[in-house]
Image (cartoon, grey):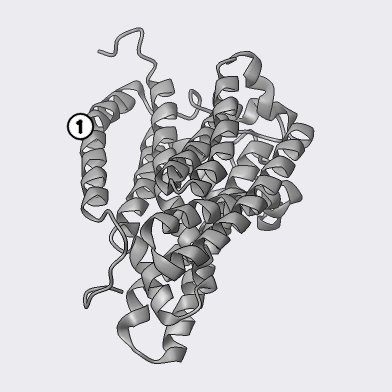
């Protein structure tokens, strides 16, 4: 029997948000490293970049799989509408993630320069495309989708590529590139680290410009994105935290504290996802045809019994995942060292 004070729909809205934060923070730097991969000047440097994420990239993607599974079980109508409406986009995303993973495994199997260059390009393009498409999806969800009374997506593929989602896609790519550059600052040393630092400053400049532009366009083009701020005034603390974290990144890098910079970029990512959740709540998919057709955490949810059983499973499983993730990152801490088992 579920206690009266426990809102399971709200709980799963929150837990899916937690899973998305975990994925964006962890796989965000993976994708960022891939985006920067082609800027390395030789084969040795590219191997170091790949091996900086080699022990952790596949574990990081588990967070995305878990978030998708939780969405399917907790909010099946949202899952059905999103995956049918974004079908081609999801296929592109899936191909990008698959070829990126294949590139990681295949690149060093042969010493031929053309072979390695081919997989370098695949790895970088796959990472960049995935980061971009995640942003496009977020932009479309914030903007609203043509969802009819039957809960079905009424538009086509090219309707997903309107200017605002494309802007959010480019913004997300810049954010992940910055996050990846900061991670590489932690994992590299010597001449490569100096080059990574130059990438980091360029990434930071591009990110700040896109952050300002995206913020202004969001206020002007998507006014409903801030409608909930009046009901949740604590959100302004999140906004302040994001601004302070962005400001702290160059300070931390300048004074040689890359871990602090990485924590700051992680807080930026987490804070932006919190703002995304607040902008949507209680909706999960907003209908641009009629707000009555929007899919919410209440009209698109599974039964209370299902949500309750899932909550018990999450209470057991999530601490195990967090412990496993912590142990893996502790084991593989420190600078990248190549050996015969490296990529």
Residue 100 can be seen, yes or no: no
Mark 1, other Cα within 10 Å: few <14 / some 14–19 / many ≥20: few
Q: Note whether 316 is above or below 54 in the view shown.
A: above
Residue with the most extreme top position? 4
Instruction: Name the image quarter holding residue 154.
Output: top right
Q: What element carries label 1?
A: helix
Q: Which residue is drawn at 36% across and 38% down?
A: 70
Q: How many discs appear?
A: 1
Left or right of 112, for residue 78 = right
Residue with the most extreme right position? 220
The residue closer to the viewer here, 10 or 188, is 188
Q: Note whether 63 is above or below 17 in the view shown.
A: below
Residue denoted by label 1: 316
Q: Which residue is drawn at 42% across and 81% down?
A: 43
Viewport quadrant of the C terminus:
bottom left
The residue closer to the viewer here, 42 or 137, is 42
Q: Which residue is drawn at 46% across and 71% down?
A: 123
Q: Residue at x 48, y 83 (%)?
A: 118
Residue 188 rendering spot, x and y as whole percentages: 39, 63
Residue 230 can be seen, yes or no: yes
Viewport quadrant of the N terminus:
top left
Q: Note whether 273 is above or below 325 in the view shown.
A: above
Left or right of 98, for residue 143 = right
Residue 147 rendering spot, x and y as whole percentages: 64, 39
Residue 246 rendering spot, x and y as whole percentages: 57, 39
Residue 313 rendering spot, x and y as whole percentages: 23, 32
The residue closer to the viewer here, 62 or 43, is 43
Q: Note whether 97 is above or below 146 in the view shown.
A: below
Left or right of 169, for residue 255 = left
């Amino acid at each position: 029997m579920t206690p009266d004070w426990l809102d399971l729909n709200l709980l799963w809205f929150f837990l899916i948000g937690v899973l998305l934060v975990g994925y964006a923070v962890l796989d965000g730097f993976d994708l960022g490293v891939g985006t920067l991969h082609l800027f390395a000047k030789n084969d040795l440097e590219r191997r170091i970049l790949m091996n900086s994420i080699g022990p952790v990239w596949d574990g990081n993607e588990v967070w995305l799989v878990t978030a998708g599974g939780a969405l399917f079980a907790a909010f099946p109508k949202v899952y059905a509408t999103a995956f049918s409406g974004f079908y081609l986009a999801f296929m592109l995303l899936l191909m990008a993630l698959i070829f990126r993973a294949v590139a990681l495994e295949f690149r060093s199997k042969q010493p031929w320069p053309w072979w390695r260059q081919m997989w370098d390009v695949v790895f970088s393009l796959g990472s960049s495309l995935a980061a971009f498409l995640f942003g496009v999806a977020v932009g479309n969800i914030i903007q609203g989708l043509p969802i009819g009374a039957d809960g079905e997506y009424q538009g086509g593929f090219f309707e997903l590529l309107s200017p605002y989602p494309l802007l959010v896609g480019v913004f997300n790519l810049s954010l992940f590139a910055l996050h990846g550059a900061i991670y590489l600052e932690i994992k590299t040393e010597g001449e490569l680290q100096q080059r990574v630092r130059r990438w980091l400053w360029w990434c930071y400049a591009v990110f700040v410009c896109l952050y300002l532009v995206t913020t202004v366009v969001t206020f002007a083009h998507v006014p409903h994105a801030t409608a909930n701020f009046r009901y949740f005034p604590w959100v302004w603390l999140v906004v302040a935290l994001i601004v302070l974290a962005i400001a702290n990144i160059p300070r931390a890098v300048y004074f040689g504290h890359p871990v602090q910079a990485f924590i700051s970029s992680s807080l930026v990512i987490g804070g932006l996802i919190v703002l995304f959740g607040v902008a949507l709540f209680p909706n999960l998919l907003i209908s641009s045809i009629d707000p009555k057709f929007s899919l919410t955490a209440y009209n698109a949810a599974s039964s209370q019994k299902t949500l309750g059983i899932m909550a018990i499973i999450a209470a057991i499983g999530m601490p195990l995942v967090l412990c496993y993730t912590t142990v893996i990152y502790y084991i593989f801490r420190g600078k990248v060292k190549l050996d015969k088992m490296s990529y």
